[in-house]
Protein backbone atom coordinates (compact mmCIF):
# COMPACT_ATOMS: atom_id res chain seq x y z
CA UNK A 1 0.00 0.00 0.00
CA UNK A 2 1.23 3.47 -0.80
CA UNK A 3 1.65 6.02 1.93
CA UNK A 4 0.58 9.62 2.05
CA UNK A 5 2.69 11.88 -0.12
CA UNK A 6 3.35 9.25 -2.76
CA UNK A 7 1.68 9.16 -6.13
CA UNK A 8 -1.84 7.91 -5.40
CA UNK A 9 -2.50 5.34 -8.12
CA UNK A 10 -4.34 2.97 -5.80
CA UNK A 11 -7.58 1.60 -7.16
CA UNK A 12 -10.25 1.65 -4.46
CA UNK A 13 -11.07 -1.86 -3.26
CA UNK A 14 -12.76 -3.46 -0.32
CA UNK A 15 -15.66 -2.17 1.73
CA UNK A 16 -16.30 1.58 1.32
CA UNK A 17 -19.57 2.26 3.15
CA UNK A 18 -21.61 5.45 2.96
CA UNK A 19 -21.16 7.72 5.94
CA UNK A 20 -24.08 9.69 7.28
CA UNK A 21 -23.60 13.41 7.79
CA UNK A 22 -24.18 14.23 11.47
CA UNK A 23 -26.59 17.15 11.82
CA UNK A 24 -27.50 19.04 14.97
CA UNK A 25 -31.14 19.80 15.82
CA UNK A 26 -30.73 23.28 14.29
CA UNK A 27 -29.80 21.74 10.92
CA UNK A 28 -26.08 22.59 11.04
CA UNK A 29 -23.44 19.88 10.56
CA UNK A 30 -21.98 18.61 13.84
CA UNK A 31 -18.35 18.37 12.78
CA UNK A 32 -17.42 17.02 16.22
CA UNK A 33 -19.22 13.78 15.36
CA UNK A 34 -17.41 13.16 12.06
CA UNK A 35 -14.21 11.70 13.57
CA UNK A 36 -15.99 9.29 15.94
CA UNK A 37 -18.03 7.95 13.01
CA UNK A 38 -14.92 7.53 10.84
CA UNK A 39 -13.10 5.84 13.75
CA UNK A 40 -16.03 3.45 14.21
CA UNK A 41 -16.01 2.58 10.52
CA UNK A 42 -12.25 1.98 10.58
CA UNK A 43 -12.68 -0.26 13.62
CA UNK A 44 -15.41 -2.19 11.84
CA UNK A 45 -13.01 -2.93 8.96
CA UNK A 46 -13.95 -0.33 6.35
CA UNK A 47 -11.35 0.30 3.65
CA UNK A 48 -12.62 3.83 3.06
CA UNK A 49 -15.74 5.94 3.57
CA UNK A 50 -18.11 7.67 1.17
CA UNK A 51 -19.01 11.00 2.78
CA UNK A 52 -21.06 13.94 1.63
CA UNK A 53 -24.28 12.67 0.24
CA UNK A 54 -24.08 8.97 -0.37
CA UNK A 55 -27.11 8.58 1.90
CA UNK A 56 -29.04 11.35 0.15
CA UNK A 57 -28.24 14.44 2.19
CA UNK A 58 -25.70 15.78 -0.31
CA UNK A 59 -28.31 17.83 -2.13
CA UNK A 60 -28.98 19.76 1.08
CA UNK A 61 -25.33 20.79 1.60
CA UNK A 62 -24.03 24.07 0.22
CA UNK A 63 -20.51 24.36 -1.19
CA UNK A 64 -18.92 25.45 2.10
CA UNK A 65 -20.65 22.71 4.12
CA UNK A 66 -19.56 20.08 1.61
CA UNK A 67 -15.98 21.38 1.59
CA UNK A 68 -15.80 21.46 5.39
CA UNK A 69 -17.31 17.98 5.66
CA UNK A 70 -14.72 16.62 3.22
CA UNK A 71 -11.91 18.30 5.19
CA UNK A 72 -13.17 16.88 8.50
CA UNK A 73 -13.54 13.40 6.98
CA UNK A 74 -10.08 13.44 5.38
CA UNK A 75 -8.51 14.62 8.65
CA UNK A 76 -10.34 11.94 10.65
CA UNK A 77 -9.20 9.16 8.29
CA UNK A 78 -5.68 10.46 7.71
CA UNK A 79 -3.29 7.53 7.49
CA UNK A 80 -6.01 4.90 7.81
CA UNK A 81 -7.13 4.79 4.18
CA UNK A 82 -5.18 4.87 0.91
Image: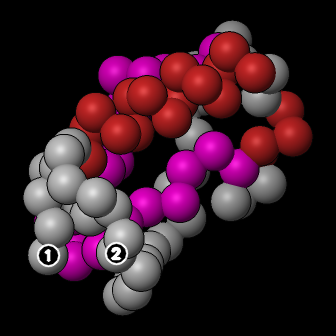
Q: Report which quarter residue 72 is drawn in.
A: top left
Task: Report the number of discs.
Answer: 2
What is the quadrant of the C terminus in the image? bottom left
Is there any visible trace of residue 9 in the rendered image? Answer: yes
Q: Which residue is mark 1?
A: 1
Q: Compared with residue 60, is residue 80 higher up or lower down, i.e. above or below?
A: below
Q: Report which quarter residue 41 is drawn in.
A: bottom left
Q: Are marks 1 and 2 in contact (CB under 8 Å)?
A: yes
Could you tell me residue 55's position as x and y percent? 70, 59
Q: Which residues are magenta?
A: 28-53
Please check the rendered image and state whether residue 25 is part of the magenta-colored stretch, yes or no: no
| Viewer-nearest residue: 26 or 35 | 35
Could you tell me residue 1's position as x and y percent? 14, 75
Seen at 65% across and 29% down, the residue is: 66
Considering every residue shown, the one lying at the far right of the view is 59
Residues packed near mark 1 inside 10 Å, few (<14), some (14 to 19) or many (20 plus): few
Q: CA distance from mark 1 to mark 2?
A: 8 Å
Q: Image check: 24 left or right of 57?
A: left
Q: Determine whether the residue tagged by mark 1 lies in a helix, strand or loop.
A: loop
Q: Which mark is residue 40?
A: none
Seen at 71% across and 50% down, the residue is: 53
Q: Which residue is mark 2?
A: 10
Seen at 60% across and 25% down, the residue is: 67
| Viewer-nearest residue: 25 or 42 | 42
Could you tell me residue 51's position as x and y percent? 55, 50
Q: Compared with residue 34, is residue 42 higher up or lower down, i.e. above or below?
A: below
Q: Report which quarter residue 31 is drawn in.
A: top left
Q: Image check: 1 left or right of 54?
A: left
Q: Earlier in the sequence, mark 1 or mark 2?
A: 1
Amino acid sequence: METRGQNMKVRPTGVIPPMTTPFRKDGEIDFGLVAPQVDWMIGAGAHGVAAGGSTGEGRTLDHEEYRDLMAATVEAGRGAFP
